[in-house]
Image (tube, rainbow, N blue to C red):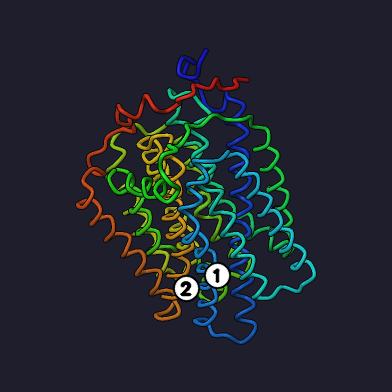
Amino acid sequence: MSDTESPAGHPFHIGNFRAYWTARLAMTLAQYAMLLIIGWQTYNIARDSGMSVGAASGQLALIGLLQFAPLFVLTPFAGLAADQYDRRKIGLLTILLQLACAAVLAAVTWQDAMTLPVLFAIAIMLGVARTFTGPALSSLAPNLVPKAILPNAIALSSISWQVGMIVGPAMGGYLYAIEPAMPYIVACGLFVVAFVALAMIGKVPQQAMRKDIRPIGQIIDGLRYVAHNKMVLGSITLDLFAVFLAGATALFPVYARDILQVGEQGLAQLAMAPATGAAITAAWFSWRPLKHNVGPKMLLAVFVFGIATIVFGLSTSMPLSLAMLFIVGAADMFSVYIRSSLIQLHTPDDKRGRVSSVSQLTISASNEGGDFFSGSLAFLIGPVAAVVAGGVGAIVTVAIWSRVFPVLRTTKTFDPPEDLLEDRHPSKPTPQEV
C-alpha cells in the first residue's frame, strides 16, 4: 500500500518519523541549552573583568552577531544542499560538528579556563552547523509520512524544534547551577542520541531538482518562489520583524544578575517560564489541532507576544516577570505552530529545502540577529528600555503586516493549494509502520 493510500493515523505510528522527531528534539535541546550558558558565561566574564552593564551587554550583542554571520552568508547554499543531497547525511555531519563544540566547551569549563575568545570561536562554529542543519531537517519531515497526516507531522516537527528551543535554555540554567560544565556534558549526550536516531532512518526518496538550472539560478528560483507566494512571504517576515524587535532572551543574564538580582537559579527560572508556556501550548495542539481561522489567530498570538514582552521589560517583580514570560512562550508557540504549517504546506517538495533555508534565515535573523540588536540597543539606551521598545515594535509589526499581507487575515485553514497536492510525494515511498 503506498503512502497516499495508507489509512490516516498518527505520525508517531511511523517508525521513521519517530526517529526523526527524537533526533530533532534531542539536538535542539542541546543547542539551546548551550546557547544560554554561552551567553551567561560571556556576560559574567565581561562583568567580572570590570565592564559596565552596558559594555557587557555589548559582548552579548557580539555573540549574537558571530552566530548570525555564518547563517547570513551560507544559508542560500544550505538550502540548495538540502534540495540536492541526502538530507539525512547533512544532518548527521552537522550533529557531529555540534558534538565536537559541546565537548570543547565542557572540557574548558571543567578546567575553569573559559575565555571570551573560546566562546566567540565556538559561537561561529555553531552558527555554521545550524545553517546546514535547519533546511535539511525541516524539509525532511514531509517526506516521511502520508499526505493525509502531513499537517499533523509538520506541526509535530515544529513543536519538537520549538519545545527544544525554549526548554533547552531552562535545562541549561538548572544544570549550570549544579555544575558549570554539566550543560555541555548533557549536550554531548543529547547530540549522541540525535545522531543515533537520525542514523536509524532509511534512505528517503526526495524529488529531484531540475538539472537545466545552474546552482545560483536554483537559489534565485527558491527566493523568487518565496517573494511571489504572499502566504509564505508574509508568514516568514512576520516572525522576522516581530521576534527581531522583541527578543528579550539575550538579556536574561542582565535581568538575572543586575535587574531582578536572582542569580543562576533565577536565570534558570526565567528560561523555564517561556518553556512551560510553550510546552503546555504544544501539548494542547497535539491533542486538539487547530483547524479554523489560522491566519487571524497567528496575528493575535504575535500581538499578545508583544504585550507580554513590554510588561516583562518593565517588571521588577520576579513572579510578574515569570508570568509574562510564560505568556511569551505560549504565544510564540501558538504563532510558530501556525506559521510553520502554512509555510511547509504551501511549498512544493522540490523547493522545500530552499524555502526552509529562507525561513531559517529569517528565524536566525530574528533570534541571533535579534540578540545582536537587543544587546546593542541595551548598550545605547539600557536593557529595560530596549525590551519595552522591542515589545512595541512587535505590536506595530502586527498592525502593518495585517494590511500589507491581507492573506494572513483571511486564511481560515491549513489546506494547501490544489496544484501542490499532487506534488507532495512524487516517488510515493511506503512509510515504515510499526
Could you tell me residue 85's position as x and y percent?
55, 40
Viewed as shown, does residue 152 lie left or right of 267?
A: left
| Residue furthest right as drawn | 111
Badge 1 vs badge 2, beta-carbon distance below 8 Å: yes
Image position, residue 267 (x, y; %): 58, 64
- Residue occupying the far bottom of the picture: 50
Q: Measured along the vertical axis of the image, is residue 83 above or below residue 227?
A: above
Residue bearing mark 1: 63
The correct choice, above or below, for 363 with respect to 204 in the image is: below
The residue pinned by badge 2 equals 375
Q: Is residue 37 depicted above or below 341 in this figure?
A: below
Q: Is residue 2 left or right of residue 235?
A: right
Judge left or right: residue 128 versus residue 393.
right
Q: Residue, x 52% and y 55% (percent of image)?
A: 273
Question: Of label 1 and label 2, which has the lower sequence position?
Answer: 1
Amino acid type assigned to the residue bearing label 2 in the image: Gly
